[in-house]
Structure formats: C-alpha cells, structure tokens
Image: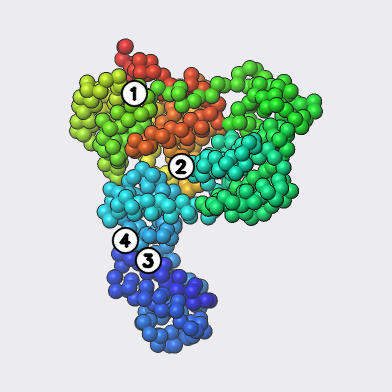
Amino acid sequence: MENKTIARTLRLLSQLMELHNENSFKVKSMAAAAFKIDKLPFSVAQKNLEEIEKIDSIGKSTASKINELIKTGVIAELQSLFEKTPPGVVEIMSIKGLGPKKVLTIWNELGIETVGELYYACNENRLIEAKGFGFKTQEEIRKAIEFKIASNGRFLYRQVEEIAEPLLLDLKKVLPGQLISFTGDYRRKCEIVDGLDVLIGCPLNEDIIAKIHSLSFLSLIKTDGKRIESEHSTGIKIYLDFCGHEAFYSELAWKTGTAEHLAELKSRLKEVPLVVSSEKDLYLKAGLPLIEPELREGRNEFELADKGMLPKLVEWDDLKGTLHSHSTWSDGVHTLEQMALYCRDKLGLEYMGISDHSKTAVYAKGLSEERVLAQHQEIDQLNGKISNFRILKGIESDILFDGSLDYPDELLATFDFVIASVHSAFKMNEEKATSRLIKAIENPYTTILGHPTGRLLLSRKGYPINYEKVIDACAANQVIIEINSNPLRLDIDWRWHQYALEKGVMLSINPDAHSIKGFHDTHFGILAARKGGVSASNCLNALNLEAITAYLKQKRGIKA
C-alpha cells in the first residue's frame, strides 16, 4: 500500500471525524499524520506497529489505525463513520473549497445530501442565506461542481448551449460563406448532450484545419478525411463533420435524427437523394411534411405526420404569463414588485403567478399561515399599483409523506392556484410514491403537479412512479402537470408529454424562478415542451390573463 493511499485515507477519516463533531484534538492529530505520511521518503507499509509509533507526529492511537489499514485494507472507525454519513455527503466533501464545517452546514442546516441538490441550491441562490457562505463562495462551489460534472463527459443542454452559439459565430468568421449547422443530440434539443456535433458544407483540407486550429479555445484531438474531433476549453467534445456544399442539406438530415427515425425515413424514400435544396425537400420526397428536428426521435412522429397531425410546436411568444416563481418572501432573491415589473416590462407578459414555498420548507423560509395572509395583502396592494399586469396568488405547497398538503383547506381556498410538489422523503418504492402523488392530485385545491419525479439531471434520479397512473389521475381531477424549466430538472420528462396530451391533460411551462434571471429558464422548458410535441393550445400559461383567470376560478368552483 502506497503512502499516498494511506495519507488519503487518514485525511478522509479526519474530515469525517470533524463532520461528526468528534474530539478536535483527535481530528487535528489525524490530519497531521496524513500530512506527515504523504511526505515520508520511505514506505510506511513496510514498517511494523512499533516502528510506525516512532514516526514523528504519529501517536499510538493513530499508529494502530495505520497498522490496521495496512493489515486489513480498512479502518473500522472510518467504516463506522461512513455508515452514519449519506454517500452524497461524502461526495460533497470532495468538492474543492468545501471543508467539513461548510459541509456540515450544507447537510444539517440546508438539508442537502447530494452534489446534484447542492448544484441546484447554488442555482437557486440558497447558499448565500447560510452562515459562512456568500455569493462569491456560492459561485466558486457552482463552478467546481460544473467542472466535476464535465469530467464525466456528459453535459446539461444549458451548459452546451452556452458555448455552442459563440462557437457558431466564430466558425462563420473563420469560414465565411460556408453553410454551417449543428446536428445530432444538440440540434434535437436533448436534455443531456455528450458532445456537440457541427456540419460544415465544404471539403476538409489543410487550409480549413489551420483556420479551425486558430480558434484558441479548441484543442484538436484527431483529424481524418471528413471529420475533426476537438475539445472545447470547458471540456466539451466538439465534432466537426465536412461535406460538399451541394450535399449539405441531405447530410444535415442524416446527421440529425436518431437511428430509428432515419431508418423509417429511408424506408419511405424510393431512393436516397444526395442533393436536395432543403431538408423540407428531402421530407417531401418521402411523402411527408417537414418534421421539426426536436421530434426526430423515432417515436410517433411519422404516425402524426401520416395523419396530418404534426403539432405546431410552442414558442416563446405564445406564452402570455409565467407561473411558479419565488420572491424574497421565501428563498427568492427579488421582491414581488421587482419580479412583477420585470415580467411586464422586460418579458412582455400579462401576469406572474407567485408561488413561494409553504410552511414545511423551513430551509427555504416557507410561509407560515400568518405570512401567507400578509403576502396576500401585499399582492392586493401591488395589483392596485401596477397597471396592465396582474400578480396571481399561488403557493408551492409541500406534499407530505402521506400525500396530504401542508395547509388546511380553508387556507388553500384563498389562493388563485396551488402547485403541489414533493421536496422531501424521496426514498419510496414505486407503489408508495405513486399513491402519494395521486392523493395530492385528488386534493380539490391542487391546480398543478410540480416537478413530478423530483429528478436532478446528471446527479439524482427521480423517485420511481407509475407515470400512467399519475397522468390518469391528473386527467380525472383536471390537474395540470408542470414542465419545470430549470435545466437541472426539465420534469415531467418530455417522453411523457404525448401520453398526457392524449389523456387531455394540460401542461404548464414553469420557470421555477428564484430571481428575475430565473425567468429566462423558461427557454429550456419550451425546448423540452417542443420535444414532447406540445402546442400553445395544450399549455396553461399560453392563456391570456382573462382566460387563465376564468380557468382558475372555474377550477376552484367560483363562478366568473
């Protein structure tokens, strides 16, 4: 066993001891021993217990643990501490800049137990509320997590988008006049992207390679006759494919769809054309209307095309308002008035549904019943003050372990809408998790089911549910399902949008905004909705103010 391995194990033991508030002298002794062993010029593993005890800075107790590790490969005390610590918390300790004291605050005070939850909290600006943290520390942690995620070679769509659009502009500068487009997973707007694929309509030659190489943020890895494989400075792999100018649109189609989509498309073509004037022309040759890139997944897009039922996919301009946002009343960054004015003046919306956290979400300054009533008073005042806009009274009510909501019916009845969401007790089997959601859905005051599975992409799987039963329950109870637009969530998964639409369930593209910047996450929700085949007619917040007000009153049984 190498000294570095022994030192690393002792360092972890000292960190876990500190995390669990053990004797500070023992913690410091273990850390000092780890530092000492890492610098020794000889192998500790070759020494017996008596010899280890004689090493400077190592006492008898520490020596016995080192000897135990050498002889058995483990330290019993370390194993015991592991058993008392959630695996995700141990992983959090590996993030640069986070010592045991900060991890303890994150774990105990904020209730965060995984790296994904921590990343989500950074994006919600929740860390700045905790003792010992500030905005700068939060940003450092967020960047360290992004670096950690990048090392796995998989990326959120948002991360790739941040470098994709500038890359496209740079490619057009060094290759003026050439046809250039994204292809693959990124063009289909997939929520997880393994690399960025680009098609360029010119043959690859040494001059082109030199121009690509001039882009300082790209490192060239490999080049063959028609492709350059490179890596962006963020760690994202960039694959540049080249073809003749005349073959560009044909190649664009063949490099965008999934294998299943392309196999069906090919079967409908009498012959596969090498040259077409556009992708639309290629699909026309197959007897089809143009199928939008987002839908080219090999699911039911050809069936819809054959029936003339391809949806007109929802766009940003279709949305008339926004629902699911958090203000300074709970864990948001901006006041109600600041958020309302931003929605009206910058986004051109007609309404904003505020839905601060409910009383169970103590970590997020959830609203007590008294504070709910106080917030309603402020909303009434602002609605009297702000013209051509309305703030709708909402709440994100926690779904408790048994499926009930955490406010009495009398209070729930005072809201314009209620988003029912799970924020705790994720460890349930499918049957229990499903019945829990269904009970919440059956509550007569539930308007929207929020982020139905609680997933955090690339970091936390959603809890298992029977999607069909949950969606059927929403259909039976006229409950809308949220498409949570936070790029870490995008929940409900787009693969279930069509089933919901077939059952007559409306969807709502909600930003889950915790700041005015957070409203722009709606963009990612729209992309997810488009992948799911959602039109404006299927979307709750595509209703204008008059229509949504009437809808919400009808849902609560109040005559308009």
- For the residues marked 2 and 4, what is the alpha-carbon distance in whole angstroms? 27 Å
**Mark 3 = which residue?**
15
Q: Earlier along the polypeptide chain: callout 4 or callout 1? A: 4
Q: x and y percent of residue 434 in the render?
A: 46, 35
Q: Earlier along the polypeptide chain: callout 3 or callout 4? A: 3
- For the residues marked 1 and 3, what is the alpha-carbon distance in whole angstroms? 49 Å
Q: Earlier along the polypeptide chain: callout 2 or callout 3? A: 3
The quarter of the picture where residue 347 lies is top left
Which label sits on residue 488?
2
- Is residue 260 in view from this perspective? no
Q: Would you say 39 lies left or right of 185 here? A: left
**Mark 4 = which residue?**
101
Residue shown at 66%/50% (left/top)?
A: 209
Question: Viewer-nearest of labels 2 and 3?
Answer: 2
Q: Secondary structure at mark 1?
A: strand
Residue shown at 51%/44% (left/top)?
A: 163
Q: Nearer the viewer, residue 296 or 208?
A: 208
Q: Nearer the viewer, residue 92 or 202?
A: 202
- Give the class, few, some or many, for how many residues have Cα within 10 Å of label 4's Cα (few <14, many ≥20): some
In the rendered structure, which amino acid carries the disc numbered 1?
A: Tyr
In the rendered structure, which amino acid carries the disc numbered 4?
A: Lys
In the rendered structure, which amino acid carries the disc numbered 2?
A: Leu
- Is residue 42 in view from this perspective? yes
